Image (cartoon, grey):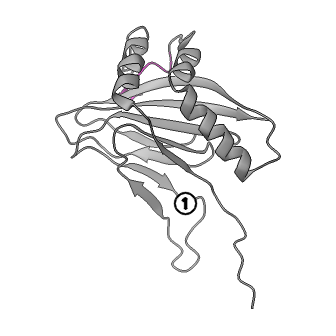
Amino acid sequence: MLQKTLFDIPIWIKEIDNFHHKKSEIDMVLSNFPETRNDTNTFFSNRSTSRDGLSKSFVNILSKEFVELRSSIKKYKPEIKGIWVTDVWSVTYEKGDYQATHNHRSTGLSGILHLENPSDGPNLNIMMPWNDWIHDTTKYYSVKYKVGTMVVMPSFLLHSSEPNLSNQRKRVVSWDMRIE
């Protein structure tokens, strides 16, 4: 009898080399792109403001990691010709803040780099895109990634951040990538 997986969903997880040094560089760049909270947000972000130059600076700081990521993605799917970061923004979750379940778009990849995450801070929840075939229930992949960890996944995956119950903030940088 043949057992085969019909579908698979890749995820790439990478701890950033020399993270503390690179974080200070990222923090310096992000200081030019302040975060705000608008009426619809349950968190602080700079996504709805102009961020000219942020993508280029971010990719330059993490150039080694993006080279490794591209290589790994091309090994997984050799037909991929190119991968480009198209947008970068930051999000901060103060006490009580959360991110509702959302996705970024139907194609491409999206990434999250955990800059700050208290030990009692919220998890990243990634929703399985179909119901469990045995129990007909929605399943979540719920993980607390340690600070300095980059997570890249298909942009269509629904994901969320639990409410931050900590007195310390959680801060991430997120980005979208286009694939050719």
Quadrant location of residue 56? top right
Give the quarter of the figure containing the N terminus: bottom right
Q: Which of 148 and 30 is in front in this view?
A: 148
Query: Which image quarter is the C terminus in?
Result: top right
- 120 sits left or right of 25 in the view: left
- Identify the element where label 1 is drawn: loop
Depth check: 150 or 34 in front? Answer: 150
Crowd band around label 1 with a 10 angstrom C-alpha radius: few (<14), some (14–19), many (20+):
some
| Res 70 → quadrant | top right
Work out whether 59 lies above or below 29.
below
- Which residue reaches farthest left? 167
Q: Which amino acid does label 1 sit on?
A: Met
Residue beneath the point at 71% across and 52% down: 76
Q: Left or right? Give the position of 71 relative to 158.
A: right
Residue 17 at x, y = what percent?
Answer: 43, 35
> In the image, which residues are magenta?
41-48
Q: Can residue 72 be seen in this view?
A: yes
Q: Which residue is drawn at 83% across and 46% down?
A: 79
| Residue 61, above or below 73 | above
Instruction: Tell which of 92 and 118 is nearer to you.
Output: 118
Residue 105 visible, this orientation: no
Asked if residue 176 lies in the magenta stretch, the reply is: no
Query: In x, y percent, where is residue 115?
Result: 36, 31
Q: Name the residue under label 1.
A: 128
**Image height of 129 relative to 15, above or below:** below
Q: Quadrant of residue 141?
A: bottom left
Residue shown at 24%/40% (left/top)? 118
- Check the image and report above or below for 54 versus 123: above
What percent of the width, then of the height, locates residue 124? 40, 47
